[in-house]
Image (spheres, grey):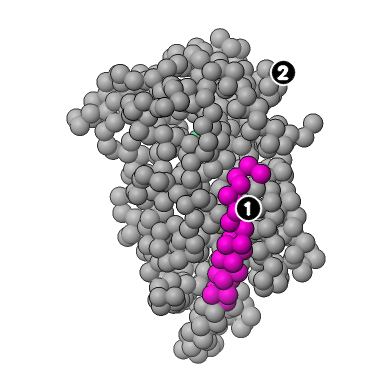
Amino acid sequence: KYYTSKEIRTKYLEFFTEKEHKVISDYSVIPENDPTVLFTTAGMQPLVPYLLGEKHPRGARIANVQRCIRTGDIEEVGDDTHATFFEMLGNWSLGDYFKEESINWSWEFLTSAKWLDIPKEKLYFTVFEGDNDAPRDEESYSLWRSLGVAEDHLFFMPKSENWWGPAGSTGPCGPDTEMFYDTGKPKCSEACDPSCSCGKYVEIWNNVFMEYSKDENGLFSPLSQKNVDTGMGLERILIALNGGTIYDTDLFKDIVEQTRKLSRKNLFGENEEKSLKIIADHLRTSTIIIGDRQGVTPSNTDQGYVIRRLIRRAIRHANLLEIPTGSITKICELVINQYGEVYPELKENETKIIHEVLQEEQKFNKTIQQGMKEFQKMLDKLDSKTKEIDGKSAFKLYDTYGFPIELTLELASEKGYEVNVQAYKDYFDEHRKKSQLGAEQKFKGGLADNSIETTRLHTATHLLHESLRRVLGDS
Ligand code: ATP
Ligand code: MG
Ligand code: MG
Ligand code: MG
């Protein structure tokens, strides 16, 4: 049996409706009441006021399917499990049920024959191991065990893996429990377990139990309203059901194949396959963002800059695959058709989406032409004997003229030059370190703790914004 996304969305909402949840429609991917973040990165994000105690008009049990954008995952794109746009299936208890119901229902939905019927042996679970701030989550552990989870399928993990809470600040926090699917790949090492990122274990669902409050002195006390916040990736659960990667799901398959058809290349090696995935992912994300009801268009600031960056990266890879100029919008059309039924605003905004992507393509082509002149000037100044573009020059091309390193590499090789990529990376890291100071120490983990992501995003946006402004002026 091959499961479709439509089937899973329906089943999930049906299941939680049976458990007396009210289904709410999804929110915009551009946060409407929170200017500190650029995108909605988790289903819980728009629900924060209710998690903090405000009464939700639909009651204390809520479920939905939320479109999420995680530009912080952009470097992961091309692996089997991370997309920059994905849908999160979520259910929430706003001071109502807690660990027992939450864990029992997750188990029932995943394993019972009536619902997803995933073999138990394929599932792995993690719970919080405890530390000086909060005790080990024995309750979650016992609940999984009582459902029949074997000891060697259940892991205690530290805060870095199984905790959700505000970064260094005060407020609600608590342990979480995560569910993983074993792809059947061999272990990458003796120590390979669900916290390993090799791809053997795929995280499918995360249940956060907000039960503590952290005060100004860093002390933890029990929270008066205890909440549950869960999120399951739609693309991920399809992998668990059908095998393969996110690109084999109905949410990606046709988009990737369409991209392949548009390419004039005949041979697809590893690099070309990766380009296909990047193009499919980035155009899918751009289409969703431009087509959102809050509508954003490519620009040099904030969300607009993120789309610009996504579209341009997609175009770079489209060039590598010899996809003719003017045809990437065919991919956007497919995304619109595919998602139009679930998210009708995409259909309504079709003309706008296509127009914006086409226009961005034209602008980018112009930028490249200008940058090329600078590139030639630089080559003329370099030592023609060693035929090497040093790290500093490569970084300058990136930083001042907006040249991605792949572009520099490609152009250099056309002229018979090598690029000192390692030295370029050193410059890049040094630069990034300077502008990112402090961000790394911030707390990571949990369902919607995207403090790092957000910081990184703002920093990245700022840096790219600066370099692009130098190239584009104010266009
Ligand atoms: P991972 O560790 O795989 O990066 P995460 O812990 O960052 O996932 P959560 O913040 O817990 O993810 O989000 C809840 C669920 O959303 C995850 O369990 C996963 O199923 C899904 N998910 C998270 N990030 C992505 C992504 N980039 N693409 C697709 N699905 C995702
Ligand atoms: Mg992640
Ligand atoms: Mg995780
Ligand atoms: Mg998680």
Does the magenta-highlighted stretch encompass residue 42? no
Q: Is mark 2 within 8 Å of ligand 1?
A: no
Name the residue: 62% across, 24% down.
14
Is 129 on the left-hand or right-hand side of 152?
left
Element type at marker 2? Answer: loop
Name the residue: 40% across, 75% down.
474
Q: Which mark is residue 347?
A: 1
In the image shown, does 468 or 6 lie closer to the viewer? Answer: 6
Rendering quarter of residue 361 = bottom right
Dot 2 or dot 1: first in sequence order is 2
Q: Where are the magenta residues, as a range?
A: 341-365
Crowd band around label 1 with a 10 angstrom C-alpha radius: few (<14), some (14–19), many (20+): some
Element type at marker 1? Answer: helix
Is 16 on the left-hand or right-hand side of 269?
left
Does the magenta-highlighted stretch encompass residue 363? yes
Rendering quarter of residue 11 = top right
Q: Main secondary structure of the magenta part?
A: helix
Crowd band around label 2 with a 10 angstrom C-alpha radius: few (<14), some (14–19), many (20+): few
Q: Can you identify the residue that label 2 sits on? A: 113
In the image shown, does 56 or 334 lie closer to the viewer? Answer: 56
Is 324 on the left-hand or right-hand side of 60?
right
Q: Is residue 209 above or below residue 387?
A: above
The residue sitting at the left extreme is: 217
